[in-house]
């Protein structure tokens, strides 16, 4: 039995779903963060469970040829990235294999998986949420301790100047940062998002007003030409970053953009993929799979951007979204873009999809599934199995729930997989997006 604080010499055999190296002691699995396959390491066991243990590298005895020097000075401390030490081409291979392995493990599906489509490895994130716990920075892995940072090299270039300007403001005006232990302090988070060289900045605070806000505007103005500043008032002691209480302070109120002929606006409260390059690649792929003769149902449609894009090509489109404000935004988006063949439905996808597909039984239907990480509800899968749309396009952010859902969709032999395509939405992390096309 492996014991905590035990020393061990390990041969690293593979990477697990989280990108941890996998070794064994007497046939018991040991996961070791920041280790790589083919490496020999000396490690200390820092945690033990019934079925596995967690180790920490003490020394790399034989290093992998795929190991590279991480560019970030906070790598191994900050919990944001866990694969910077792995050559980027090998990161892509890892994600391709991860999807293939998860399909086999959770879905009993053996199929070809296309090579993961790459992204810009650095400076790809268009959004960051920086927490405060006495200092401003990023969480240590698996903790709420904060590593103070002055840049984040997977976030676009504006993040360094933003942090410097904001830190100057809080130092000069003695603005207290929130402390999780004492529940005291003013500033809980700094949130920012960029689009087309526009920047929206949100300061999350525990009171109704931000002191000396003119000084903050002055510092920001000296660094950015096209930005907006607002505050979000969050007095609750929980892990939710944003509340529903907002105040606009200065400049832009929203960001404006245009994708595939659809003009839209977003705020810091809106959902948008953090990687513009891969977002556009996924939307382009989905659009290429739709024909002018199809009626498209966009399940889990959010604020309706993909629905609007698809409606420009499809015969007709329906969007289903449970959050009322998102449906209202989707309706506004359709109106602003003069879209007349899109109907947005506010409700639970598990309840609305079955009744909708019954009404569309005589039509050539394609369904887009883009569920949250937990995957599709049982009722959604059942409604698809009963209604038998001609085509299902599944966009997934979780290979294990994707595999579970595909297993259910394939079990009656109604569908076949046409392709499985991973996308690297989050370079330097183990996360992967995937598109799967199912056809009758």
Image: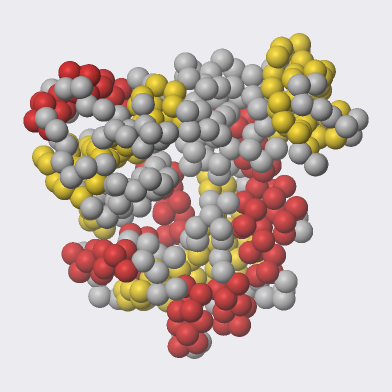
In the visual, does 70 lie left or right of 41? Answer: left
Q: Is residue 160 above or below residue 349?
A: above
Q: Residue at x 25, y 75 (%)?
A: 340
Q: Looking at this view, is 335 or 130 the one in front?
A: 130
Q: Residue at x 72, y 56 (%)?
A: 106
Q: Is residue 48 above or below residue 110?
A: above
Task: Tell me the quarter of the picture where residue 31 sits.
Answer: top right
Task: Tell me the quarter of the picture where residue 207 sits.
Answer: top left
Q: Residue at x 67, y 75 (%)?
A: 414
**Where is the N terminus found, in terms of image quarters?**
top right
Q: Looking at this view, is 131 or 23 the one in front?
A: 131
Q: Would residue 314 be seen by someone viewing this image from the given angle?
A: no
Q: Would residue 316 be seen by someone viewing this image from the given angle?
A: yes
Question: How many marks do you count on the picture?
Answer: 0
Q: Looking at this view, is 235 or 40 the one in front?
A: 235
Q: Is residue 409 above or below residue 107?
A: below
Provide residue 167's location: percent of width, then percent of height: 25, 22
Q: Residue at x 72, y 31 (%)?
A: 47
**Where is the C terminus found, in terms of image quarters?**
bottom right
Provide residue 182's location: percent of width, then percent of height: 38, 33
Seen as rendered, the residue at the extreme right is: 26
Provide residue 395's location: percent of width, then percent of height: 52, 57
Q: How is the image coloured?
A: secondary structure
């Amino acid at each position: 039995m492996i014991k905590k604080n035990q020393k061990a010499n390990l041969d690293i055999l593979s990477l697990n779903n989280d990108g941890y190296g996998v070794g064994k002691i007497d046939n018991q699995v040991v996961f070791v963060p920041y280790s790589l396959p083919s490496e020999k390491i000396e490690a200390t066991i820092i945690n033990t469970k019934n079925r596995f243990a967690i180790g920490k590298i003490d020394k790399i005895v034989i290093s992998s040829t795929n190991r590279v020097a991480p560019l970030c000075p906070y790598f191994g401390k900050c919990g944001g990235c866990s694969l910077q030490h792995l050559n980027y081409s090998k990161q892509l291979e890892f994600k391709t294999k991860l999807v293939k392995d998860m399909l086999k493990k959770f879905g009993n599906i053996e199929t070809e998986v296309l090579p993961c489509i790459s992204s810009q490895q650095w400076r790809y994130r268009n959004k960051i949420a920086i927490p405060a716990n006495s200092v401003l920075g990023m969480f240590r892995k698996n903790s709420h301790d904060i590593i103070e940072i002055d840049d984040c090299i997977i976030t676009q270039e504006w993040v360094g100047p933003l942090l410097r300007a904001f830190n100057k403001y809080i130092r000069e005006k003695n603005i207290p940062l929130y402390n999780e232990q004492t529940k005291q302090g003013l500033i809980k988070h700094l949130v920012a998002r960029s689009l087309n060289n526009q920047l929206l900045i949100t300061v999350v605070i525990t009171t109704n007003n931000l002191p000396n806000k003119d000084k903050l505007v002055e510092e920001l103005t000296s660094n950015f030409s096209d930005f907006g500043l607002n505050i979000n008032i969050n007095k609750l002691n929980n892990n939710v970053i944003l509340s529903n209480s907002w105040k606009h302070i200065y400049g832009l109120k929203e960001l404006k953009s245009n994708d595939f002929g659809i003009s839209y606006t977003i705020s810091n409260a809106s959902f948008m993929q953090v990687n513009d390059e891969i977002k556009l690649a996924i939307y382009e792929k989905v659009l290429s799979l739709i024909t002018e003769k199809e009626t498209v149902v966009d399940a889990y449609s959010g604020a309706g951007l993909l629905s609007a894009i698809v409606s420009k090509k499809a015969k007709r489109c329906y969007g289903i979204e449970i959050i009322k404000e998102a449906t209202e935004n989707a309706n506004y988006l359709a109106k602003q873009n003069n879209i007349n063949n899109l109907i947005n439905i506010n409700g639970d996808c598990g309840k609305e999809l079955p009744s909708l597909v019954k009404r569309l039984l005589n039509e050539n239907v394609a369904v887009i599934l883009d569920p949250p990480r937990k995957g599709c509800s049982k009722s959604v899968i059942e409604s698809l199995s009963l209604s038998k749309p001609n085509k299902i396009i599944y966009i997934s952010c979780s290979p294990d729930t994707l595999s579970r859902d595909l297993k259910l969709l394939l079990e009656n032999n109604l569908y076949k997989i046409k392709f499985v395509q991973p996308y690297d939405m989050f370079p330097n992390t183990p996360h992967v997006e995937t598109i799967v096309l199912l056809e009758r």
